Amino acid sequence: MRLKNYEWSRHGLTEPLLTAIVYKKVEDGKNVAAYRFLYYANKVITIFEDNSYRGGEVIEETNEATIEGLAKEISKFSEDNDDLIVIGEEKIGLKLLEMLFN
């Protein structure tokens, strides 16, 4: 997995503290699916959607709302050629990137 983009911003009311998106690709570089990880204060929600655009499906909810748990979830659903985008609180995001890439 490689880091494609990151953006640090404060969360608004009811928004997750951090959102991470893993884009699955095929050999020619097209996005064929995505996993979205929503990190809230008390839960991590994992959503999957393929390129048929039928809508995302919640595939996992975990009450392990830790950066370690989020990194574990992302690692579980990612492969070497996937792209990662991270948006959210800087302190949390930097800790997540350190865990994923060190």
Image (spheres, rainbow, N blue to C red):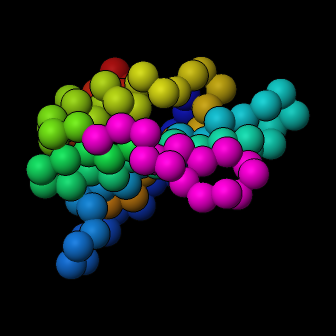
- Res. 94 in view: no
Magenta stretch in the rendered image: 47-61
Q: Quadrant of the C terminus?
A: top left
Q: Quadrant of the N terminus?
A: top right
Q: Is residue 47 above or below residue 90?
A: above
Residue at the extreme bottom: 13
Q: Is residue 30 above or below residue 55?
A: above
Q: Is residue 27 above or below residue 3?
A: above
Q: Is residue 97 above or below residue 47?
A: above
Q: Left of 79 or right of it: where is 81?
A: right
Majority SS type along the magenta span: strand
At horizontal 67% and vertical 57% (from top left) the residue drawn is 54
- Res. 102 in view: yes
The image shows residue 2 at horizontal and vertical percentages of 55, 33
At horizontal 65% and vertical 26% (from top left) the residue drawn is 81
Residue at the extreme right: 28
At horizontal 13% and vertical 54% (from top left) the residue drawn is 41
Q: Left of 49 or right of it: where is 28?
A: right
Reply yes or no: does residue 12 show up in magenta: no
At horizontal 32% and vertical 47% (from top left) the residue drawn is 45
Label tally: 0
Residue situated in front as seen by the camera: 24 or 91: 24
The image shows residue 14 at horizontal and vertical percentages of 23, 73
Image quarter of residue 40? bottom left
The image shows residue 33 at horizontal and vertical percentages of 66, 42
